[in-house]
Amino acid sequence: MSNRTAVEERQTRETQIKVILDLDGTGIFSGSLNIGFFEHMLDLLARHAFLDLSVEGHGDLAVDAHHTVEDTGILIGRAIRKALGDAAGMVRYGDAWVPMEEALAHVVLDICNRPYLAYSVPGGSVKIGDYDTELSEEFFRALCVNAGITAHIRLLAGSNTHHIQEAVFKAFGLALGRALARDPRIKGVHSTKGVL
């Protein structure tokens, strides 16, 4: 089996970020972007997807966290795409339900090279620490577009914003990990077309 790892960097006037990714890791997150709550969410995503993920860098946080969060999504998406290579043997589809006390999130995704995000998590912009929760949608969109993932992210219940965000990131991580898994029964890519 090939080594499914990748390194991606982005240097702009707004951000300087580096991502190191191992799709077959043990769920270890490391790094710093100086956005505490977002780093906590990345840790949850990595842990539940069994990805080893390092994210180091900084952005124009004096403006806000938008560029840093979006560019992190771009880089993680690119790293997933690169690390997958030809995607041979990959399950492709992932589905996860995650409760977090009163919150309940559902994520279904397809790593299919047809990027699309349906994000149904109401709540608008609420601050948790220095993090605007509306940036979660920007993060997932950037990740999905750059990784070639179709994802449906839904909130079925929830009132506590922290619980909602945790449930969403955990569910995405679980679904992603299931989709990235390899199945020895799959020869080539898991598609009747023969390509993704």
Image: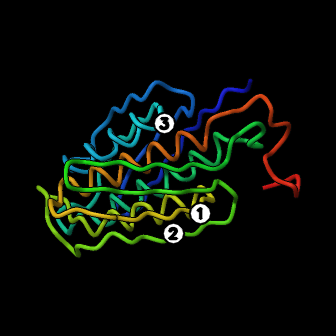
Q: How is the image coloured?
A: rainbow
Find numbered disc 3 in the image and state the secondary structure of the residue it sits on. Answer: strand
Q: Is residue 153 above or below residue 49?
A: below
**Which residue corresponds to the image point at 76% horizontal and 36% vertical from the top-left?**
89
Between 32 and 37, which is closer to the camera in this rendering?
37
Residue 162 image offset from top left, x and y in percent = 18, 54
Query: What kind of residue is marked 3?
Result: Ile
* Residues at circles 1 and 3 in contact by the CB criterion of under 8 Å: no
Query: What kind of residue is marked 1?
Result: Thr
* Residues at circles 2 and 1 in contact by the CB criterion of under 8 Å: yes
Give how far apart the Cα atoms at labels 3 and 2 are.
Answer: 24 Å
Query: What kind of residue is marked 2?
Result: Leu
Give how far apart the Cα atoms at labels 2 and 1 are.
Answer: 6 Å
User: Mark 2 or mark 3, which is nearer the start of the sequence?
Assistant: 3
Residue bearing the label numbered 2 = 117
Residue bearing the label numbered 1 = 150
The quarter holding residue 44 reads top left
Find numbered disc 2 in the image and state the secondary structure of the residue it sits on. Answer: strand
The quarter holding residue 137 reads bottom left
User: Mark 1 or mark 2, which is nearer the start of the sequence?
Assistant: 2
- Left or right side of 57 for 2: right
Decide: few, some or many residues near mark 2? Use Cα within 10 Å; few <14, some 14-19, many ≥20: some
Residue bearing the label numbered 3 = 20
